Image (spheres, grey):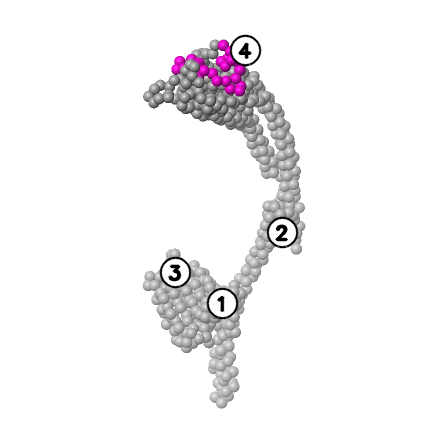
Amino acid sequence: MESSIPAQEPTRSQSIRFWENSIVRRYFFLSLLVTFIPLVITIFLYDRLTGELQQNIDQQRYQLQLKQVKSEMTSMLQRHQTALRAIASLPDIGKLLQKDVQLSSATLNLIYFDIDRPEIYGALFFSHQWQLKQALPGQSASGSPYWNGDTFSIEQLPKIQIGSDWLIGPQPPLRGKSGWYLIARQIEALDQGKESPGYVAFQVRLASLTSPLTILDSEQSGYGCLKTSSNSCFSSLAGLKPPSKNTISSVNFLSNWQIQLNPDVSFQQASFYQESQTSQRGLYMAVAIITLTLVSLFFTALVARTRRRIQPLIHGAEAIADGHWNHIIPSTGHDEITQLTRSLNRMAEQLKSLMSARIQMEKKVTQGDFATGVAHEIRNPLATIKVCLQSLPLSSNNAQATELKQLMLEEIDRINQLIQNLLDYSKPPKPLTHQIDCSALLQRVLILVEPLAKEHSIALTLKTSDQTQCKADPEQLHQVIMNLLLNSIEALSGTEHGQIHLHCYQQNDKAVITVTDNGPGISETDQKKVMEPFFTTKTSGTGLGLAISARLVELNNGQLSLSSRGADQTSNQLDSGTTAILTFNI
C-alpha cells in the first residue's frame, strides 16, 4: 500500500504565501474591515442620537410631572368650587349683602364649616359691581379686609371664568403679606325671575395652589413655575420669579395660565449635555481601539490555526490527484474542516472502490468475450456429439442403455440452452424499435401461455386499452413478457386458486405493462439480488431469465421493476404476490 506523497507536493503548497495570494489573508483584512466599519458607524450614530434620546426621555418625564402638578391643582380648585356651590345655594345667603341683617346660626355654621380650612382666609360677599359688602374670617384670616380699615379692591386683578365660577387674581405677595386669589360664584336669587343679589367668594392662600410645583423643583432640571394671564410667574412658595425665555417644558392649566418647568440658568442644560457627550466620545474611542485590538489578535490567532488545518487538506488533495488512493488525511475536531477532511478521505476510498470496480468490469468484459468464444467452440463439438449419440443403434431389449441415451441427450440440450443464455446476456441483439400495439401483443402472448396455465389450474386475466402503444422491439418485448409469465406460472405451480393478471395502460406519457400474480412472493433479501446474473431460488435454472429480461428492457429505453410481498412480510398468505412493472416510451 502506498501512502507517501511525491516530493513536489510541499513545494506547490508552500508557494501560497500569506502576504501574496493567500485567501486567508483576504478574509483576515475583510473581517477587520467588516468589524471596523459597523463599529465606527455605531459609535457615530450612538453619539449623535444619545443626546436627543436623553432629551426626549427627560421631556417625557417632565410632561408626566407637569400633568401630576396640574391634576393636584385642578383637584384643589374643584374642592373649593364644590364648597362654594353649596354656600351660594343656601336660601338666605343673600341677606349678608344687606345692612343690619343677621343670618341664622345654622347658615353661619355651614359657612364657617366650609371656610375653616388652613388654605382659606375667609368668605367675601360682593355686589354686582364687585364691591365688597361682607367678610367672614376663617381660621387663617389676618388683617384686611377682616379686622382693619384698609381699602380692599379687586378692580385691578384679572378675572377668568371657570364654568359658572370666577377665578380672580392672583394677588402677588406685598409688604410681608402672602399672595392670594379669589374663587367666586354668583349667589342664587331668592325669588324666581329676579336677578342675583351678588357674589360669594373664597379668599384662598396662593401658596396652597402652587405647593404641588415642588415636584418640579430639581437642581439638575430647574424649578416649577405657575404663569398667569398677567405674565407673572409664581414659584412653589408663591414667590414671584422672573419670566424665563428658555422654558424646558410646559402644560396649559387655565385660560392663559401655564404650568412651566424653567431652568435655573439658561445655558446649564446645554452645557450639561455637551460635557456628557464629550466624556462619552472619549469612552467610545477607547472602546473602539480596545475592540479593534482584540479583534485583530483574535483573527491573527484564527488565521494561524486555520492555515495549520488547511495545509494537510492541500497535501492530501494533491496526493489523491496523483493517484495515492491510500493516503489518509488526519482529522481532529468536529467542525466544517473536519467534515471536509472526512469527505476527502471518503472520496479517496470511493475513488479507490470505483477504480477497483472498473478493473473488475474490464475483467468481466474480457471474460465475457472469452466465454463467448469458448461457448462457440463448445457448441460445435457438442452438436456433433448429439448427432452421433442419436445415430447410435441400440437394442430395444436394452432399456437401461435407452434411458441413459435419453438422459445424455437432455443434458446436451440443457448445456446448449445455458450456452445460448450466456450468449444472449453477453451480446444481446440490437433492438429494432418501432410503434407497437401493446394490447395485440399481450393477447398473442396470452394465447401461447394459456394452455400451460390451464395445466397448472391458473387463471389468466387481461385488461388493456386499445389506444396504448409503446416504442420497442416487438420480438424482444414478446420475450420479456413471456419470461415474466413463465416465472409467475412456476411460482404458482402447486398452489390453489392461482391467478395472473396482465394490465396495460398509459400514464404520464409512458406505456405501463404490469404482470401480477398471487404467488408466495419474494423476500426482501432476495429482491435486492433477483436481477443479478446467475441468481436463482429455484432448484433448477440458470438464474439468467430476469437478468436477460432487464437487459432487453434497458436496451429498449425502458425500465423493469419488481414489487413483491413475500410470506415473511405479511401475516396472511393470501396477500402475498409479485408485480412486475414494465415502463416504455410512447
Left or right: where 465 falls relative to 122: left
Q: Which residue is mark 2?
A: 324
Amino acid beneath label 1: Thr
Q: Which residues are magenta?
A: 125-149
Amino acid beneath label 4: Arg
- Quadrant housing the C terminus: bottom left
The residue mark sitting in front, 4 or 3, is: 4
Cα distance in 3D space between marks 4 and 3: 117 Å
- Quarter occupied by residue 200: top left
Q: Is residue 132 magenta?
A: yes
Q: Is residue 19 magenta?
A: no
Q: Secondary structure at mark 1?
A: loop
Magenta span: chief secondary structure = loop
| Res 170 label | none
Q: Which residue is mark 4?
A: 175
Q: Secondary structure at mark 2?
A: loop
- Name the residue at the bottom extreme: 397
Above or below: residue 546 compared with residue 187: below
Q: Are marks 2 and 1 in contact (CB under 8 Å)?
A: no
In front: 374, or 118? 118
Q: Earlier in the sequence, mark 4 or mark 1?
A: 4
Q: Are marks 4 and 1 in contact (CB under 8 Å)?
A: no
Q: Are marks 4 and 2 in contact (CB under 8 Å)?
A: no
Cα distance in 3D space between marks 2 and 3: 48 Å
| Res 511 label | 3
Q: Earlier in the sequence, mark 2 or mark 1?
A: 2
Above or below: residue 129 compared with residue 504: above
Cα distance in 3D space between marks 4 and 2: 111 Å
| Res 570 label | 1
Q: Earlier in the sequence, mark 4 or mark 3?
A: 4
Residue 56: percent from the left, percent from the top? 52, 26
Amino acid beneath label 2: His
